[in-house]
């Protein structure tokens, strides 16, 4: 204690000097960050403005953030003269089904793996981890083979069923259920409630934060999914926003580069994902970190 | 297993109920993952050693076992398939070599910058850097096709610096070729590894592939930034503060205190980066379909393209070879970087121990006056 008090003036002096240097550093850092933020945001601003430009304007002034003449032709064309509304409908159907399925089945299985004792539990758990480590793109052709073999190729079933549960989500729910105390369930069990009732009425309501994470991840995952729909379907009537806009990108509607049209379509399909992001911003920023902490 | 089973039989009613409920609860997951993950792998393994043409069931008498023929035709370095595969591996290898280090460094840099307590508008910056990660591969590729088009935004910016930009997505020239003025002659024209000569291995990523490389760094750095931010929060300011009082400079503090503590996260980010970059598919399909001159073809895209043009055996074989590549790459990485949690120490012990050693190392650097 005495020795600290003796050296104290010197130490605080150093710290003060450091602080000053730090403040100077912060100014430089702020400039660097602002420059980087411009690089990250500018492309999206250009995208928005280009979608309101005429085709000639888009080609001649790619950089300008304000259209020379405002035009909503691209959007009018998308909504009135293309399959865009159909793609959007399909995307909503698939995303809704996948998200509901994952929330229910992932938490059901996660609860069983964390809390219920049954023969084969450990084997299932290890299989789950094994399945998680197979890279998705390797499974594209195999998945097509099974979808084709089952005779569900080019149907909504082929689009939804393979995505209806995900090993990662089960794993996450299992970890969550393992982390909450089991005294609540004990009480319910003594009251004579069945396992499903306990799960549905007692445990699931407690799992709201974990469920939110599953909802956000499945929404973004299925909304942005592309390669699975590519191998599961072929008819134009089953295109989602991802597969639809992808064909738009390589072909377009008629001639020309059609950048306003393509960028407008890409912008619109980003809106729901962006809304989810801004609404659940805090949750997303924390969950990604939380998933890795363990 | 048996012990728990016996002890549970004592509490008969409840235990039996749990057994039934347990299986009922996991059945949907087991069925769906079984049908759409496990069965497909077995089926594709069979297809990869068969001559199935794509019509009818692969399990009929008309489909024959052909041994490793599909695998050797991809790997033996002879013929068009093998050459394209060689190119695909080269393309993807350069993609990995550029994207993984750059996105790791950039995401770490961004995380450190936005984690500074004194920084104003931290949450704004976090959101700005993370936003590209929210967009789908389709939306971002469409945007990229516009930004990197011949008369696009990127070339416009380059023209301000009086550089005439290339026609990015249509330019098959190797970046390495242009930087080092390589020519396909002399010893460079010799050699054959996976069907392509040394010149082609050294030519580097094409200009078209470079646009994809930049896109990958742009879209994933935000995701990995979040991992680093979480890790930095875990480290806390205490260790930093301790090193500060010890008199360590900002760089020494980062190098000897923060970076060693970030090692597990660094390991995760590099592993995820390696696995992810070898799987690039969506962007290629949407953006270039593997062109120009096969310089953006990747093994994942080639597997798809080969299979869906009727060569199912070869396509499935390429998919499994890609699986092998990913496994080998992560093993190599594990060898080089070492196990993330090699010691048996608990995390906290490890943290304290590392922090102490780090603080003293930082102080030592200060005293010896070594500059990095």
Image: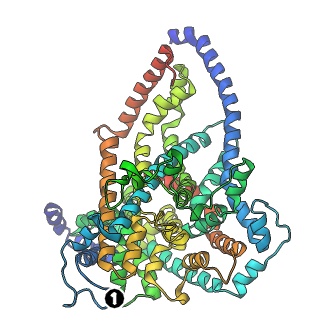
Pick the front one: A251 or B185: B185
- Residue at 57% x, 70% y is B138
Callout 1 environment at 10 Å: few (<14), some (14 to 19), or many (20+)? few
Pick the front one: A242 or B357: A242
Pick the front one: B279 or B220: B279
| Residue A43 horizontal side relative to residue B324, left or right | right
Pick the front one: B36 or A171: B36
Image coordinates for residue A174, horizontal then vertical, percent: 37, 62
Image coordinates for residue B180, horizontal then vertical, percent: 50, 45
Q: Chain of mark 1?
A: A
Q: Quadrant of residue B350?
A: top left
Give the answer, above or below, for where A119 lies relative to B365: below
- Residue at 42% x, 63% y is B279
**Residue A247 visible here:** yes
Image coordinates for residue A159, horizontal then vertical, percent: 45, 82
Task: Write down the residue under mark 1.
Answer: A150
Image coordinates for residue B177, horizontal then vertical, percent: 49, 51
- Residue at 30% x, 85% y is B53
């Amino acid at each position: 204690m005495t020795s600290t008090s003796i050296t104290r003036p010197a130490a605080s002096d150093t710290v003060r000097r450091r602080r000053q240097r730090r403040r100077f550093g912060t100014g430089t850092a702020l400039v660097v960050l602002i420059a980087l933020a411009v690089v990250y945001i500018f492309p999206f601003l250009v995208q928005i403005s280009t979608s309101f430009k005429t085709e000639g304007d888009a080609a001649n002034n790619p950089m300008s953030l304000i259209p020379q003449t405002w035009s909503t032709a691209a959007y009018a064309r998308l909504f009135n003269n293309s399959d865009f509304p159909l793609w959007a409908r399909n995307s909503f159907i698939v995303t809704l089904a996948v998200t509901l399925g994952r929330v229910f089945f992932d938490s059901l299985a996660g609860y069983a793996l964390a809390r219920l004792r049954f023969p084969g539990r450990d084997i299932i758990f290890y299989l789950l981890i094994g399945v998680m480590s197979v890279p998705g793109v390797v499974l594209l052709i195999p998945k097509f083979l099974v979808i084709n073999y089952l005779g569900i190729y080019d149907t909504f079933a082929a689009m939804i069923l393979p995505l209806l549960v995900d090993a990662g989500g089960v794993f996450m729910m299992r970890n969550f259920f393992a982390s909450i105390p089991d005294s609540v369930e004990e009480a319910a069990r003594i009251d004579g409630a069945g396992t499903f009732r306990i799960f549905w009425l007692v445990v699931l309501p407690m799992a709201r934060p974990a469920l939110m994470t599953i909802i956000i991840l499945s929404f973004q995952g299925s909304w942005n999914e592309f390669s699975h729909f590519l191998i599961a379907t072929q008819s134009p009537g089953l295109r989602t926003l991802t597969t639809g806009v992808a064909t738009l990108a390589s072909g377009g509607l008629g001639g020309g580069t059609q950048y306003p049209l393509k960028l407008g379509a890409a912008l619109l399909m980003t809106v729901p994902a962006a809304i989810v992001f801004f609404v659940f911003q805090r949750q997303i920023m924390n969950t990604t970190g939380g998933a890795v902490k363990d | 297993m048996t012990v728990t089973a016996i002890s549970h039989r004592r509490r008969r009613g409840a235990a039996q109920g749990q057994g039934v409920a347990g299986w009922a609860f996991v059945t949907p997951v087991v069925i769906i993952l079984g049908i759409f993950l496990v069965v497909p792998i077995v089926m594709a393994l069979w297809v990869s050693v068969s001559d199935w043409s794509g019509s009818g069931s692969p399990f009929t008498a008309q489909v024959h076992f052909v041994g490793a023929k599909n695998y050797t035709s991809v790997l033996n370095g002879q013929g068009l398939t093998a050459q394209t595969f060689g190119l695909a591996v080269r393309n993807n290898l350069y993609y990995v070599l550029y994207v993984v280090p750059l996105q790791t460094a950039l995401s770490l840099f961004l995380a450190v910058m936005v984690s500074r307590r004194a920084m104003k508008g931290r949450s704004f910056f976090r959101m700005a850097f993370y936003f590209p990660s929210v967009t789908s591969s389709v939306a971002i590729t469409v945007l990229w096709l516009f930004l990197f088009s011949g008369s696009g935004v990127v070339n416009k910016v380059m023209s301000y610096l009086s550089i005439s930009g290339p026609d990015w997505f249509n330019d098959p020239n190797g970046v390495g070729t242009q930087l080092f003025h390589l020519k396909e002659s002399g010893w460079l024209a010799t050699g054959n590894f996976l069907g392509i000569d040394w010149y082609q291995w050294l030519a580097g990523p094409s200009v078209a592939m470079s646009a994809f490389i930049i896109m990958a760094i742009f879209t994933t750095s935000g995701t990995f930034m979040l991992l680093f931010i979480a890790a930095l929060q875990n480290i806390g300011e205490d260790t930093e503060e301790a090193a500060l009082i010890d008199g360590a400079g900002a760089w020494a503090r980062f190098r000897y205190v923060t970076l060693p503590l970030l090692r597990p996260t660094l390991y995760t980010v590099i592993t995820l980066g390696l696995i992810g970059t070898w799987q690039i598919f969506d962007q290629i399909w949407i953006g270039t379909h593997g062109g120009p001159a096969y310089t953006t073809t990747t093994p994942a895209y080639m597997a798809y393209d080969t299979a869906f043009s009727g060569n199912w055996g070869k396509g499935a074989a390429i998919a499994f070879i890609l699986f092998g590549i990913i496994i080998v790459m992560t093993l190599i990485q594990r060898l080089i970087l070492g196990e993330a949690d090699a010691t048996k120490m608990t995390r906290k012990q490890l943290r304290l121990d590392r922090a102490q050693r780090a603080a003293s190392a930082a102080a030592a650097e200060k005293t010896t006056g070594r500059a990095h």
